[in-house]
């Protein structure tokens, strides 16, 4: 057993589990702001009841996100200490900023959001909701900045310290605004909005199918659908721009995403397929010249392929290819579901279209799967580099780390995370089945 591979599996497991919750928190923060703003504008008690219900869901996802995120970061010291020494100046500043400017802001105002309804004025409570939403987004900013620096390093120089090298920041803002940071941030945030929007659509559709909390469900669905349309169409645009950045700064990753092998030749784009890396062949359906068109605006222009790189510098092709194309397929499905729902809402038939409501109930899984596959594409496509072009993944593992140690912790992580996930599903199911509280509506009427 290889401690490098096991450490990668462990980190992949923990971050995949963690990444279920922050997208929901980020997106629900936006939806909470919209709902509470509508309450302040209309003074309709239903909007306050909606805000209170979804705030409770937000609190649950926030708690699981914090618990899983803190544990994940410990691995930088236990499994990846060589990497931590190399990037400590860069990564440490981003994580410190995330704690100071994001986590404290979000957690500080969260108490008012959850428990301050009857203790502060409506406007102060609205301010706390906005601050919580901003805190969730600020957290995403600094985490994406740190990860994007690993993809496209900038604003640093290499310092020789004793027998080791380390990256040291020379321009903080160049590090923050590294070439891939802002477009990856935008794409990630829109993916988070999608996750929350389809979660709201799922629960609302469930209530409508059960003919429970009908007014609550209809209004929640209207808001969720608006966010879903904006986020799904925005993800299409930002995904394209992100691909252009990848083509410029990480051509090997782009080549793996489309299984483009010739060193320099016009590239096609596949709708689906299976890659035979040994024979450098793809069995599937594709559009010739489409990759060249998207990258260069010309179907005849060459695109850098995998054969332009030594075999040891190429990412695993088929896993990246499958993850990327599945993500794109799910993204197009989410666009379709959003637009169909918006059209039926415009026609006034959405809430009676039971087949679409049933699809919405289960559609909650699609953006989660798309987000996970997007992360997989980005991180596995960067291999064999842990910091692109500077440090290989194998060099980042802690010296002296044994496979047995990693395997033991991996087993314990898996058991604990499974238990936490079951608990999360149980509590979430309990809150959804219980539904919005009638007391919330009565309190809202009294405060009008």
Image (cartoon, rainbow, N blue to C red):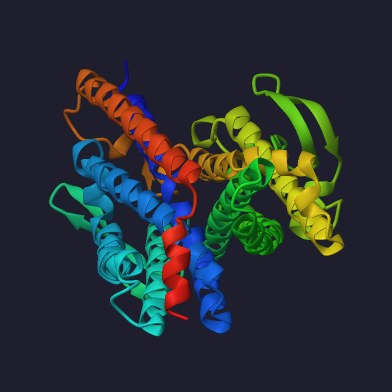
Q: Where is residue 361 drawn, in percent x and y?
A: 64, 41
Q: Nearer the viewer, residue 26 or 43?
A: 43
Left or right: 247, with 114 as reference point: right
Q: Where is residue 414 drawn, in percent x and y?
A: 32, 26
Identify which residue is drawn at 74% across, 56% down: 295
Q: Nearer the viewer, residue 397 or 360?
A: 360
Q: Nearer the viewer, residue 253 or 311?
A: 253
Q: Is residue 59 above or below residue 371?
A: below
Identify which residue is drawn at 49% across, 59% down: 28
Identify which residue is drawn at 48% across, 53% down: 23
Question: Dividing the picture into quarters, in which one does residue 76 lie?
Answer: top left
Left or right: 407, with 140 as reference point: left
Q: Is residue 275 above or below residue 225?
A: above
Residue found at the very far left of the displayed protein: 162
Question: Dividing the picture into quarters, in which one does residue 322 lie?
Answer: top right
Q: Where is residue 162 drawn, in percent x and y?
A: 12, 51
Q: In the rendered image, which quarter contains the N terminus?
A: top left
Identify which residue is drawn at 25% across, 25% down: 412
Residue found at the very far top of the displayed protein: 1
Question: Dividing the picture into quarters, in which one does residue 121 lie?
Answer: bottom left
């Amino acid at each position: 057993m290889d401690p490098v591979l096991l450490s990668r599996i462990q980190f992949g497991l923990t971050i995949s589990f963690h990444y279920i919750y922050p997208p929901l928190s980020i997106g629900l923060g936006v939806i909470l702001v919209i709902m509470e703003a509508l309450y302040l504008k209309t003074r309709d008690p239903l909007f306050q009841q909606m805000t209170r219900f979804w705030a409770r869901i937000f609190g649950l996802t926030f708690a699981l996100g914090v618990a899983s995120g803190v544990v994940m970061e410990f691995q930088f010291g236990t499994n990846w200490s060589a990497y931590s020494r190399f990037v400590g100046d860069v990564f440490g500043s981003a994580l410190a900023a995330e704690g100071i400017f994001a986590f404290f802001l979000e957690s500080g105002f969260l108490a008012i959001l959850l428990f301050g309804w009857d203790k502060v004025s409506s406007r102060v409570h609205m301010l706390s909701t906005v601050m919580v939403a901003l805190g969730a987004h600020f957290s995403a900013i600094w985490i994406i900045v740190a990860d994007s620096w690993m993809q496209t390093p900038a604003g640093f120089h290499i310092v020789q310290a004793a027998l080791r090298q380390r990256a040291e920041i020379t321009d903080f803002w160049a590090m923050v605004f590294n070439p891939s940071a802002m477009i990856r941030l935008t794409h990630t945030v829109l993916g988070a909005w999608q996750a929350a929007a389809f979660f709201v659509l799922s629960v609302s559709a469930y209530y409508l199918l059960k003919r429970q909390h009908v007014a609550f469900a209809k209004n929640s669905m209207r808001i969720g659908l608006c966010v879903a349309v904006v986020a799904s169409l925005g993800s299409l645009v930002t995904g394209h721009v992100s691909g252009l950045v990848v083509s410029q700064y990480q051509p090997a990753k782009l080549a793996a995403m489309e299984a483009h092998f010739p060193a320099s030749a016009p590239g096609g784009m596949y709708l689906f397929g299976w890659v035979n890396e040994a024979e450098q062949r793809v069995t599937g359906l594709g559009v010739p010249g489409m990759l060249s068109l998207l990258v260069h605006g010309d179907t005849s222009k060459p695109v850098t392929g995998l054969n332009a790189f030594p075999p040891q510098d190429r990412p695993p092709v088929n896993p990246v290819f499958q993850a990327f194309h599945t993500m794109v397929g799910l993204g197009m499905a989410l666009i379709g579901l959003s637009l169909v729902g918006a059209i039926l809402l415009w026609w006034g038939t959405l809430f009676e279209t039971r087949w679409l409501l049933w699809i919405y109930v289960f559609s909650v899984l699609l953006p989660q799967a798309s987000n996970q596959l997007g992360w997989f594409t980005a991180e596995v496509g960067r291999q064999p580099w842990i910091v692109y072009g500077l440090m290989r993944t194998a060099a980042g593992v802690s010296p002296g780390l044994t496979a047995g140690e990693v395997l033991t912790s991996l087993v314990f992580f898996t058991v604990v995370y499974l238990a936490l996930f079951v608990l999360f599903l149980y509590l979430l199911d309990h809150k959804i089945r219980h539904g919005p509280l009638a007391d919330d509506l009565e309190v809202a009427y009294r405060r009008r």
